């Protein structure tokens, strides 16, 4: 049947005749299909047995150079990558969390004169900065920092350039104490924008400031700017 050049109709007719003969003689009517299926499976099995695979993590031209070695062999190369969707979606939280997403004590530096404002927030630092930025934009004198910029016609800058994170902590006595110390410190250095009238004498704070001065951290604003 496969030797002669038969049309599709004639081939099907021959198949029907053969199957009918098999049925009449109580044989399995599908030996042709089974034979073809087994032959196909055997060929696939042979291809699988002949072909071997090597897996490489793609890192660039070095990988391409190495895999060229296998081109003339029966080993096929499969390239993989470390940047899979699964890994990208399961990135650890601490790797994606910015320091500006936390809360605590922060410092804002005037980009024009370098004087400093100390503040606290129990919300993300970036949220608090956006409030300062909005107040400056619309001339809302809600904080001493914005009052300083507006009164002296000083400029403002991007958060990453003028905002420093002093201490990360939650709302409470610790936050209040740390804020008061840094306001006290900048007051003694004559470098603070906060209200100086709110700063009260504190023996502990004074001792800490003296230690900072001894370490070379106690230069005044005038000394830093050369005035």
Image (cartoon, rainbow, N blue to C red):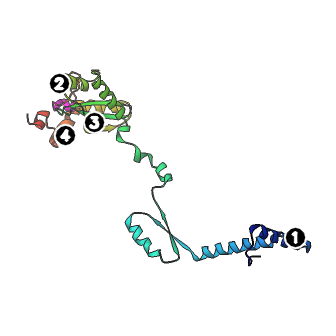
Residue drawn where x is 19% and y is 36% of the image: 209
* Residue 99 at x, y percent in the picture: 35, 41
Secondary structure at numbered mark 4:
helix
Whether residues under marks 1 and 2 lie with C-beta atoms below 8 angstroms apart, the answer is no
Q: With 170 as the anchor, is 73 left or right in this view?
A: right
How crowded pointer 4 is (Cα within 10 Å; few <14, some 14-19, many 20+) is rated as some
Q: Tell me which residue sits at (25%, 34%) in the image.
A: 157
Foreground pick, 156 / 207? 156
From the viewer's side, name the closer residue of 35 and 152.
Answer: 35
C-alpha distance separating marks 3 and 1: 87 Å
The numbered mark at residue 152 is 2
Measure the C-alpha gap from mark 3 to mark 4.
Answer: 28 Å
Q: Position of residue 220 (x, y in %)?
A: 13, 34
Q: Main secondary structure of the magenta part?
A: helix
Residue 106 location in percent, x, y? 29, 34
> Which residue position holds label 1?
20
N-term mark: 1 or 2: 1
Residue matched to label 4: 212
Which structural element holds mark 1? Answer: helix
The first of marks 3 and 4 along the sequence is 3
Which quarter of the figure is the C terminus placed in?
A: top left
Earlier-in-chain disc, 3 versus 2: 2
Determine which residue is flagged by label 3. Answer: 158
| Label 2 vs 4, first from the N-terminus | 2
Range of magenta residues: 184-190
Number of the label disc, if any, that sits on residue 144: none
Ranked by sequence position, the earlier of labels 3 and 1 is 1
């Amino acid at each position: 049947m496969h030797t002669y050049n038969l049309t599709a109709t004639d081939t099907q007719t021959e198949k029907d005749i053969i199957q009918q003969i098999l049925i009449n003689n109580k044989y399995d009517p599908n030996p042709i299909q089974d034979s073809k299926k087994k032959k196909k499976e055997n060929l696939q099995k042979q291809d699988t047995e002949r072909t071997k695979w090597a897996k490489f993590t793609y890192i660039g031209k070095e990988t391409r150079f190495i895999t060229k070695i296998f081109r003339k062999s029966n080993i096929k190369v499969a390239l993989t990558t470390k940047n899979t969707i699964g890994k990208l979606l399961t990135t650890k939280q601490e790797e994606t969390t910015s320091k500006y997403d936390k809360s605590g004590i922060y410092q804002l530096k005037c980009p024009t004169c370098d004087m400093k404002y100390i503040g606290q927030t129990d919300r993300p630092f970036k949220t608090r900065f956006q409030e300062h930025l909005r107040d400056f934009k619309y001339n809302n004198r809600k904080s001493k920092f914005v009052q300083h910029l507006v009164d002296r016609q000083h400029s403002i800058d991007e958060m990453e350039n003028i905002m420093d994170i002093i201490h990360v902590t939650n709302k409470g006595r610790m936050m209040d104490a740390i804020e008061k110390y840094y306001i006290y410190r900048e007051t003694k250095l004559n470098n603070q924008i906060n209200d100086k009238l709110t700063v009260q004498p504190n023996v502990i704070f004074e001792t800490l400031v003296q230690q900072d001065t001894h370490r070379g951290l106690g230069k005044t604003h005038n000394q830093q700017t050369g005035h």
